[in-house]
Structure formats: structure tokens, C-alpha cells
Image (spheres, grey):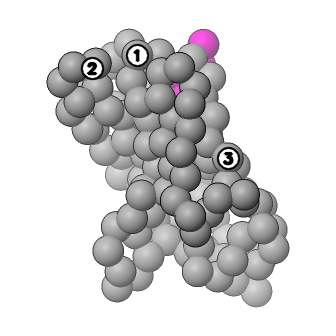
């Protein structure tokens, strides 16, 4: 059974940093793409970042240069390092696992809340 569980959310001041983690289980982690999405209050859910099995990454323009996605295949974990946080980064952040190769099912976690406020 595929599971992804996010952690690391919390309250941070504007300009601060936070690292989110997503622990995965139930599948061959190294072969799946892993994505982060977010949903701000009263807004549509939006894509944030992706890392595929070969380590290639892509980011939404709104976070490029501030956020970094990475993965540790030995720990079955994907990370989202968030720097220079802005109030508009406040959202529930979701991790997804996309796979297996050739099928591209997307499995969602329950999310972790990030609040950027002074």
C-alpha cells in the first residue's frame, strides 16, 4: 500500500526557512517521481516542485531560486527546503508519489501546514 506522510510544517517569520519532509512506503521509492503541491486558503491547489527518478528537478516560477527539492533514496524520503519565505507561501503543503513507471498513478499525503507570519 503506497503511503506518503508529510512533516515539518509550522509557523515561521517572513524571510525565514523551513524544511519539509515526506516519508514514503509501500513502493519502490527510487523509481517514482515525487512532487510537492500547496493550497493556500481560498485558492486552488498549485504545483510547487518535482524530482524524478534520475534526480532532475523542476519548480514553479513562484518558488524558483528559493525552494529546493531533494530526495534520499536510502531513506525513502523527499525534502523541500524553503528559504526566504514570504507571507504568500502560507499554505498546506502536499507530497505526492507518481508511478510506477508507465502507469503514473499519483498518491497523495494529507498535507502539512506552513504559516509565514510575523
Q: Give the CA distance from mark 3 to mark 2.
A: 24 Å
Quadrant in the picture for residue 102: top left
Mark seen at residue 100? 2
Q: Give the CA distance from mark 3 to mark 1.
A: 20 Å
Mark seen at residue 4? none
Q: Is residue 112 located in the magenta-colored stretch of the structure? A: no
| Label located before the other in sequence (3 or 1) | 1
Q: What SS does tag 1 mark?
A: helix
Give the residue pinned by disc 3. Answer: 68
Q: What SS does tag 3 mark?
A: strand
Q: Are marks 3 and 1 in contact (CB under 8 Å)?
A: no
> Residue 113: percent from the left, percent from the top?
51, 65
**What residue appears at the point 31 percent right and 44 percent down from the top-left corner?**
108
**What residue appears at the point 56 percent right and 38 percent down from the top-left corner?**
57
Specify the segment rendered in magenta. Answer: 74-79
Q: Give the CA distance from mark 1 to mark 2.
A: 7 Å
> Residue 115: percent from the left, percent from the top?
60, 74
Q: What SS does tag 2 mark?
A: loop
Q: Are marks 1 and 2 in contact (CB under 8 Å)?
A: yes
The quadrant in which the C terminus is found is bottom right
Residue 51 visible in the shown view: yes
Q: Residues within 10 Å of mark 1 (few under 14, many from 20)?
A: some
Left or right relative to 9: residue 66: right
Give the residue pinned by disc 1. Answer: 31
> Residue 48: percent from the left, percent from the top?
49, 56
The quadrant in which the N terminus is found is top left
| Label located before the other in sequence (3 or 2) | 3
Judge whether 57 appears above or below 27 on screen. Answer: below
Q: Residues within 10 Å of mark 3 (few under 14, many from 20)?
A: some
Left or right relative to 110: residue 81: right
Amino acid at each position: 500500500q503506497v503511503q506518503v506522510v508529510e512533516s515539518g510544517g509550522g509557523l515561521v517569520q517572513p524571510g525565514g526557512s523551513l524544511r519539509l519532509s515526506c516519508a514514503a512506503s509501500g513502493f519502490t521509492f527510487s523509481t517514482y517521481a515525487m512532487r510537492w503541491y500547496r493550497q493556500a486558503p481560498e485558492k486552488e491547489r498549485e504545483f510547487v516542485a518535482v524530482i524524478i527518478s534520475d534526480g532532475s528537478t523542476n519548480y514553479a516560477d513562484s518558488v524558483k531560486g528559493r525552494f529546493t527539492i531533494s530526495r534520499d533514496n536510502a531513506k525513502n524520503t523527499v525534502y523541500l527546503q524553503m528559504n526566504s519565505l514570504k507571507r504568500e507561501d502560507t499554505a498546506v503543503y502536499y507530497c505526492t508519489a507518481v508511478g510506477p513507471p508507465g502507469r503514473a498513478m499519483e498518491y497523495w499525503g494529507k498535507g502539512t501546514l506552513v504559516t509565514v507570519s510575523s
